[in-house]
Amino acid sequence: MKLCINKLTFSYGPISILKDVEFDVGLGEMLSIVGPNGSGKSTLLKCINRILKTKNNTVLVDDQDTCKMNLKELSMLMGYVPQSSSSTFPFTVFDVVLMGRKPYIHWNISERDNEIVADMLDYLGIGHLGMRHFNELSGGEQQKVIIARALAQQPKLMLLDEPTSSLDIKHQLEILCMLKSLAQSKERSVIVSMHDLNLASRFSDRMLMLKNGCIFALGTPEEVLTEKNIEAVYGIKANVSTSFVGKPQVTPLMNETDLFSHTKLSPVLEQKH
């Protein structure tokens, strides 16, 4: 399977968000999308998954236009994990993950569907939460459940929007190791948007750096995470060294005085009560 993004452009009314974005992702590859807030990372994932509509022939899978696929075909092809998910209904964790099997369920839920759900819960170490209500879980637990739901779809392409934002460092590493393993198995491709440049560097085969809705840099972590690129995109000076795993590691060089030297304290904050 090969995903090709061809001159993808998207606007919210008169506000341009993405401009002529082009890249491809092959089977077995893990690509991270990085960039400042508002650079278009989440919008790009939603365009790929057709949550947001784009022009024909901008998102192609094995040369097939996804705009011509029905929702069932698309769901079997792509699994999507949003930044956050909430539910006011008392669904159990098992039921939430079972929703990922919807493209495969014709009349009744099969034993195979139940087995896949149970396997995904165990795979992510949350089998003990199966009968808990989703809306009673912590943010980190909910995020793992939503990842399990996407995996239950058995997609060829996983799209994840900041999947580790609600997790502590141990569980961040667990999830990213799992995603990397999924890609290395050559069964799937993984595209993940991230803010943490060092985690993105450690686990990605390639990185795509966005600035103002355009691709600023695309390549290996070594090619993308340069001191020049970081200053141009994020507006901060940083030192880029080599981590213990041989990947670029970014250390910002700005301290608190540098960051706030241009900011005068609000008179409201200076008031004494």
Image (spheres, rainbow, N blue to C red):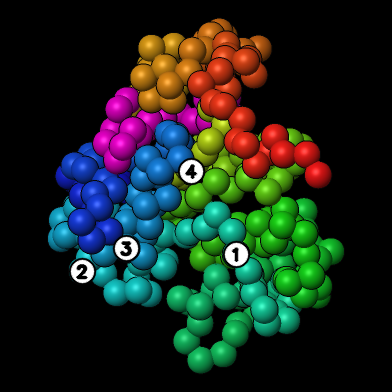
Image position of 271 with respect to 100: above or below? above
**In which quadrant of the rendered image does the C terminus lie?**
top right
Q: Quadrant of residue 99?
A: bottom right
Q: Residue at x 37, y 52 (%)?
A: 43
123 sits left or right of 179 in the view: right
Relative image position of residue 111 (x, y in whole percent): 65, 80
Mark 4 vs 1: CB contact within 8 A: no
Query: Disc 2 or 4, which lies upstream in sequence?
Result: 2
Asked whether disc 4 touches disc 3, contact meaning CB atoms under 8 Å apart, the reply is no
Q: Calculate the distance from the C-alpha at mark 4 to the C-alpha at mark 3.
A: 17 Å
Which numbered disc flags the more N-terminal residue, 1 or 3?
A: 3
In this rendering, the label closer to the viewer, 2 or 3: 3
Q: CA distance from mark 4 to mark 1?
A: 17 Å
Which element type, helix, strand or loop, lies under badge 3?
A: loop
Q: Amino acid at mark 2?
A: Lys
Per the image, the residue denoted by label 4 is 192
Q: Which residue is mark 3?
A: 52
Q: Position of residue 250 (x, y in %)?
A: 55, 17
Mark 4 and mark 3 lie on one chain; the one further toward the N terminus is 3
Is residue 209 inside the magenta stretch? yes
Please tell me the numbered disc located at residue 68: 2
